[in-house]
Amino acid sequence: MQPVSARLTGEMVSSIGYVKLKILSSIHLEDFFLFLFSAMMLDMKKPLLHIKKSRTGMGLFAGHDIPKGTKIIEYVGEIISDEEAQKRGGQYLFEINSKWTIDGSTRANKARYINHQCGQGNCDAMNVRDHIFIYAFRNIKEGEELTYNYGEEFFEEHIKPKGCKCRKCMPEDK
């Protein structure tokens, strides 16, 4: 038996007062109802996620405690061929598979503000039916910056030449 799916847009969710993210994704109804229940339990005066200055530039931060395993956000943008991705280059390209890549450079893609963390960050990116979702790898506290490991290829090309500024490589002075 196939699971029942629903289309959920950020505009629909905003209109009922639960979230202010403008994302478009396919989700299963059980995920949707779990999301609604979770949203009702939160203080809705605070955003679920917010962008602010971090040690590496801009970052995405948790507006509430996020339990381990929670699907946080989808990495969205224009779907382009691998050939087009090679032409464009840039640091906001997220490979879906060997043929297709997401160009997440649009500012509407709030997931682009999740910064790199050497080792294991507090999030993990997963490809689910050619959609890239960011999940909480562990419990994340309110106010904590969201991070995940971008992988060796990205690290070598974009981060290493400038020097990594993640918490593992540059711990804060106490």
Image (tube, helix red, strand yellow):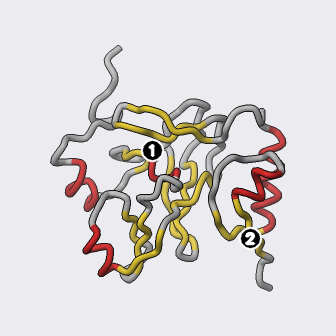
Q: Which mark is residue 147?
A: 1
Q: Nearer the viewer, mark 1 or mark 2?
A: 2
The image position of residue 64, as x and y in percent, is 66, 35
The image position of residue 137, as x and y in percent, is 54, 49
Report the label total. 2
Is the residue under label 2 in contact with that under label 1 (CB below 8 Å)? no
Q: Which residue lies under the disc numbered 2?
A: 7
Residue 63 lies in what quarter of the image?
Answer: top right
The image position of residue 41, as x and y in percent, is 82, 39
Q: Which mark is residue 44?
A: none
Label 2, residues with CA under 10 Å away: few <14, some 14-19, many ≥20: few
Residue furthest bottom in the image: 1
Q: In the image, is 63 to the left or to the right of 114?
A: right
Residue shown at the point (62%, 46%) measured from the top left? 68
Position of the C terminus, as image quadrant, is top left
Residue shown at the point (45%, 39%) measured from the top left? 59
Residue shown at the point (78%, 60%) measured from the top left? 32
